[in-house]
Image (spheres, helix red, strand yellow):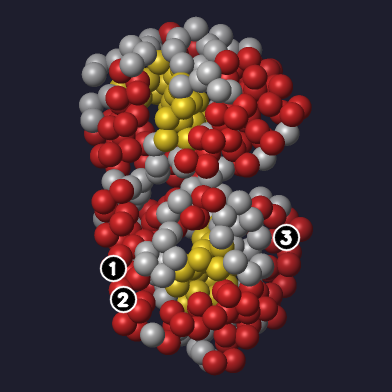
Amino acid sequence: MTKKIAFFTPYFHSNRGNATTTKRIVHGLREAGIDVFVVPYLEERWSDEKEEQLKKCDLYHILHIYRFAKWNMCRELLLDKPYILTNGGTDINYDLANPAQVAEMNQMIQAASAITVFTEDGRSIVQSLFPDKIIKIIPQSVWFEDRNDADVLQLPKGNPIIFLPAGIRAIKDPLYVWKEIKELKKTFQNLQFIIAGIVIEKDLFHEIDKLCKQYDWVHFLEDVPFYQMKQLYEHADITINTSVTEGQSSSIIEAMYNGCPVLVRANEGNLSLVKHEETGFVFTDQQSFFMMATKLLTNKDLTDTISTNGEKYVLEHHSLQKEVGQYIQLYNQFL
């Protein structure tokens, strides 16, 4: 395939989930010999140079439907090539649940060549609204940039480490199990709780900042470069996910890939990745979180088994080659 693809993404330079997704897919496409022109439409100004580059492209791949639709209401970019739309988490669970926002996206969705989602649940939601569209499930994969110049993170001393990778916003619910973690500290006296992410909602960050100042074992690492995240997964004893909803958590895939046991809140995105008591643990409320965290922190054989199973699952089902191959196959249908 020698065609040129324009990849539209809301974020590419910042440490957000959409940026991680974009960098991974773009890297995989380029490794496969495909020419990709990346357009971070919320981070970079439009220019005549971009306009000229776009004319040379044969297909557009657009990440995050609603954000792009809102941006293009001002830009009025003519989508005159075949284009693929990829839904993530927020656009599946919130934007498509809002009739007013669906109306804003409707024309763009109707004219799309195909739509991709990460999970079966995502496909069901899109299909219920747009039954005539081609909808393909392409699960996320995992990829870490290989950098020899990566600085070593200064991590807090003490263990076990409970690690929460999450942008600071309400949908991630980062303090959902705070009381239970504080209770765990009574048993595991050297326990460290680390949250790593970017600040999106400042009011919520202020709550976390207060805890960091009050407790010397609570830490917030802001805007950690993605290539350094591997160090956190490798040092953590448990990686947790507390999100109210998820499309499909790339951080959970990354943790499993790095052999870190995962303990995740029950939602459709997490359930698409974690099989309870086999590749990880799934909690339904704060009490079950406490019980499962205690079990993972006190039973090394169980932890080792969960870690091995999780890593094996990701290698088999979420390889970059498989993900990129499915996108290329889809592109070829419209080129």
Q: Residues within 10 Å of mark 3 (few under 14, many from 20)?
A: some
The one of 304 and 40 positioned closer to us in this rendering: 304
**How far across and how far down the image is residue 294, in percent?**
50, 83
First in sequence: mark 1 or mark 3?
3
Q: Quadrant of the C terminus?
A: top left
Residue 162 drawn at (x, y percent) = 50, 74
Residue 64 visible in this rendered orientation of the protein: no
Circle 2 packing at 10 Å, graded few (<14), some (14-19), many (20+), is some
Query: Would residue 314 appear left or right of 269 to someone viewing this image?
Result: left
In depth, the one of 149 and 299 nearer the eye is 299
Residue at 40% x, 43% y is: 140
Q: Are marks 1 and 2 in contact (CB under 8 Å)?
A: yes
In contact (CB < 8 Å): disc 1 and disc 3? no
Q: CA distance from mark 2 to mark 3?
A: 34 Å
Q: CA distance from mark 1 to mark 2?
A: 6 Å
Q: Is residue 299 above or below residue 2?
A: below
Per the image, the residue denoted by label 2 is 304
Q: Which residue is mark 3?
A: 204
Residue 59 visible somewhere in the drawing = yes
x then y, percent, for residue 174: 63, 63
Question: What is the quadrant of residue 10 in the picture?
Answer: top right
Query: Given the image, on which type of amino acid does mark 1 rest?
Result: Thr
Which residue occupies 73% across, 64% down? 206
- Which residue position holds label 1? 308
Query: Residue at position x 58%, y 75% from top?
Result: 288
Q: Secondary structure at mark 2?
A: helix
Q: Residues within 10 Å of mark 1 (few under 14, many from 20)?
A: some
Position above or below: 222 against 81: below
Residue at 50 percent across and 77 percent down: it is: 292
Q: Is residue 123 left or right of residue 69?
A: left
Dot 2 or dot 3, earlier in sequence:
3
- Specify the amino acid type for callout 2: Asp
